[in-house]
Image (cartoon, grey):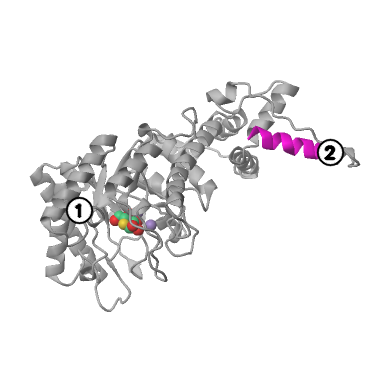
Amino acid sequence: MTESDPYRPTRDDHFTFGLWTVGNRGRDPFGVEARPALDAPYIVEKLSELGAWGVNFHDDDLVPFGTASQERVRIIAAFKHALADTGMVVPMVTTNLFGHPIFRDGAFTSHDPRVRAFALQKVMRNMDLGAELGAGIYVFWGGREGSEVDAGKSPIEALKRMREALNFLYAYNLDQGYGYTFALEPKPNEPRGDIYLPTVGHALAFIATLDHPEGYGVNPEVAHERMSGLNFSHGVAQALDAGKLVHIDLNDQQPGRYDQDFRFGQADPRAAFFLVKVLEDAGYTGPKHYDAHALRTEDEEGVWAFAAGCMRTYKILQDKVRRFNADPEIRAALERLDSRGSQGPTPPASYTRAGAEALKGASVDVDAIAAQGLGYERLDQLTTEILLGARRVCARAEARDGPGPTTGDDARQRRPRPRRSMRVSSGRLPPLLVALIARSVEVAATE
Ligand code: GLT
Ligand code: MN
Ligand code: MN
C-alpha cells in the first residue's frame, strides 16, 4: 500500500476494531490458544498505523477480571497514553457478561438476583471508564441471555428482567450525565442454544417497550443475521428506516455454520457489496466496527493482514458502489423502473374519501402490466460485471469503438491508464483462440 493508494483507509472512514478482535488468540471449542497475547497499547499503535479510527473493548479485555486496583490504574494509564500518542478514539465500550461461569445462565436474565446485581455493577463500573475515555455508544450483546432448556426459564419473564436491567442502566446513564446511546446487538444462538432477541427485528420491537426508546439503537452484525439465514442488508435497512442504526459489526459468515466471524467480504462479497451500498446510499457515518478475527491458521502477521483486508475490502466495495451508481446503463435501467406507470392511476399521497372513491373507479390495465418484465436479469448481470471488474473494460471498448459512456466517477477512471499489453504469440493456435486469449489478457491487465 502506498500513500496514493485509493483504498487506503483514513480516520474519516470511522473504521474500528475491538481489542478482542485483533487480540483473538485462536482458541476454539476444540483447541487452545494458537497465538500469543497482544498488549492493548501495542494493538492501538498497530491499528492506527493501518488507518483505523478507533478501538473498542469489553471491561475484561482491557483489565482482566479480578485485576488488583493498582494494576488496573497502571493498565488504564498505559492505554490512555497509547490513545493520546496515536489520536485513536474509543467510540464504543461494552461489558463481558458471558465469560465468567457466574453468567452460565445469563446475566440480566438470571434467576438469581445476586447475579443480576453483579451484572449491573459490572456494567456501571465500565460505563464509568468508557465515559472517562470519551465513548458515546454502549453495546449490549446478551450472549448468555438464552436457554437450551425451555422448562427452566420463562421467556416472558426473561424479557421482563432484561427490560428492568436496561431501564436501570439507562437511568444511571442519565443520572451521571454520560450521554451514551445504548445499542442492542442481536444474535440467534451461540453460545446459548437460543438467545433472546435473536434478530434485528426482535431488538427493534423490544426497544419500543423500554422506558427511554429514544436513547437506544441496534448494533447488527453480519454473521449473526446470516446464521439465521436472513438478508443482512435488509435488516440494516430496517434499522436505518427506524433511525436506529447507531453502530454496526462487520464481518462475514457462511449461512448455517457456527459463528465464524470471518474477515469482511471473505465469504460473500456480493452480499457485502449490497451492504456497503445500503450504508453509503443512506449516508451512514457512524462507527464501522470489524467484529471479526484472523483465522486460527495465522500468526501475528496474519492478524494485521486480516485487519488491513477488512478495511480495504470496504473501500474497494465503496468504489464499486460509486461505479454502480454512476453507470449509465444501470442508471437508465433504474430510471425505466421508476418511470413505470407514470401514465396510469397512482396511489394518492394521503387518504381522502374523494380520492378513495376516484381510485375505486379508476381503470387499471391489469393484463398489460402483468405482461411486462422488469429487466432484473440484465441489471443483475451488470452488477456482477461491476463486481468482477469487467464493466470498465466494456466501457473502454465502447469509448474506442463508438460513443462510450464512462462507468465510474473517480479520478483513476478518468486518468488514461498506460496500456499494459502482452504479446500473445500465435504459434499454431487457431486465430479465434488467439483472439480470445489476447482479449482475456487485456481484461486481466486492466484490473
Ligand atoms: C463477542 C460477540 C460479539 C459481540 C461482542 C460484544 S463480544 O465477541 O461474538 O458479536 O459484538 O459484546
Ligand atoms: Mn460474531
Ligand atoms: Mn458483534
Relative image position of residue 242 (x, y in whole percent):
32, 43
Residue 445 falls within the magenta-colored stretch: yes
Relative image position of residue 288 (x, y in whole percent):
37, 42
Residue 244 seen by the camera: no
Relative image position of residue 219 (x, y in whole percent):
32, 49
What secondary structure is marked by label 2? helix
Which is in the foreground here, disc 1 or disc 2?
Answer: 2
Looking at the image, which residue is at 34% across and 53% down? 23
User: Ligand 2: does it lie within 8 Å of the C-beta at label 2?
Assistant: no
The quarter of the rendered structure image containing the C terminus is top right
Mark linked to residue 210? 1
Magenta highlight: main SS: helix
Residue 5 seen by the camera: yes
Q: 43 or 276, which lies in front? A: 43
Specify the amino acid type for callout 1.
Leu
| 200 shown above or below 28 | above
- Residue that lies at the very extreme toward the bottom in this rendered image: 151
Mark linked to residue 434? 2
Compared across the picture, whether 69 is left or right of 388 comes to left
Relative image position of residue 258 (x, y in whole percent):
44, 65
Mark linked to residue 6? none
Range drawn in magenta? 434-447
Residue 389 falls within the magenta-colored stretch: no
Corner quadrant of residue 58: bottom left
- Residue that lies at the very extreme toward the left in this rendered image: 175
Looking at the image, which residue is at 42% across and 39% down? 279
Dot 1 surroundings within 10 Å: few (below 14), some, or many (20 or more)? some
Give the alpha-carbon distance from disc 1 to disc 2, as whole Å.
68 Å
Question: How many circles with numbers are drawn on the protein?
Answer: 2
